[in-house]
Amino acid sequence: MPRDLEEFSGIWIVSEPLKLLFEQMDPEAFAFVACDFSLADGSRGPQYYLGNVLRRIDALDEAASRVKIKLDHNHQTGEDEQLYSLVGGASLVFKQDVVGDAHIFRQDRMGAPPICDRAMFDALSAVNFSGLRLRDVADI
């Protein structure tokens, strides 16, 4: 049986209870599509969804964070772009005025999983969903 959260090639497979929590906490951040799930005997399994975090914002406070900043040349625009690297460890701080009331988002120019606030972190931890890997971004 799949866990509450499985990830394949960047796409999430999410259980019904986890989807409901995500939508309760931050409905604007996600997109979900119901998928068919059949058990080995051919009977219908529990409802799962393909989904992901769509919200992308640039909220990193570079001055307050400890993160490697690299320049990468964008061949389409001809300009160099800043990329954030977590390799070797980091401590991330986000601008609250940019994050606003978002409970989860993807940080622009950072190849990292979605970032959630303490309210989402606590709600996910309280239910003990399987397949989630939660880490504190203050000490990666």
Image: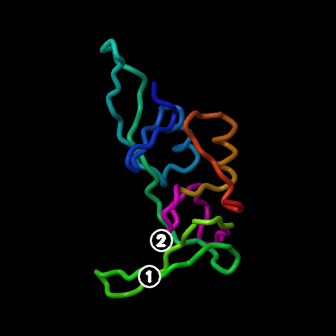
Q: Which residue is mark 1?
A: 81
Contact between marks 1 and 2 (CB within 8 A): the answer is yes
**Structural crowding at the residue carrying mark 2, measured as other residues with C-alpha within 10 Å and reported as few (<14), some (14–19) or many (≥20):** some
Badge 1 marks a residue whose secondary structure is: strand
Q: Is residue 102 magenta?
A: yes
> Residue 13 sits in which quadrant?
top left
Residue 128 locus on image (x, y percent): 65, 34
Residue 24 locus on image (x, y percent): 56, 43
In the image, what residue occupies the spot 58% across and 47% down?
25
Q: Quarter of the image containing the N terminus?
A: top left
Query: Does residue 41 appear to the left or right of 91 in the view shown?
Result: left
Q: Amino acid at mark 1?
A: Glu
Q: How is the image coloured?
A: rainbow
- Tell me where the magenta segment starts and ends, as one range: 92-113
Badge 2 marks a residue whose secondary structure is: loop
Query: Does residue 22 appear to the left or right of 88 in the view shown?
Result: left
Q: Is residue 125 above or below residue 47?
A: below
In the image, what residue occupies the spot 35% across and 18% down?
44
Q: Which residue is mark 2?
A: 109
> Residue 122 sits in which quadrant?
top right
Residue 20 locus on image (x, y percent): 52, 37
The residue most toward the front is 88
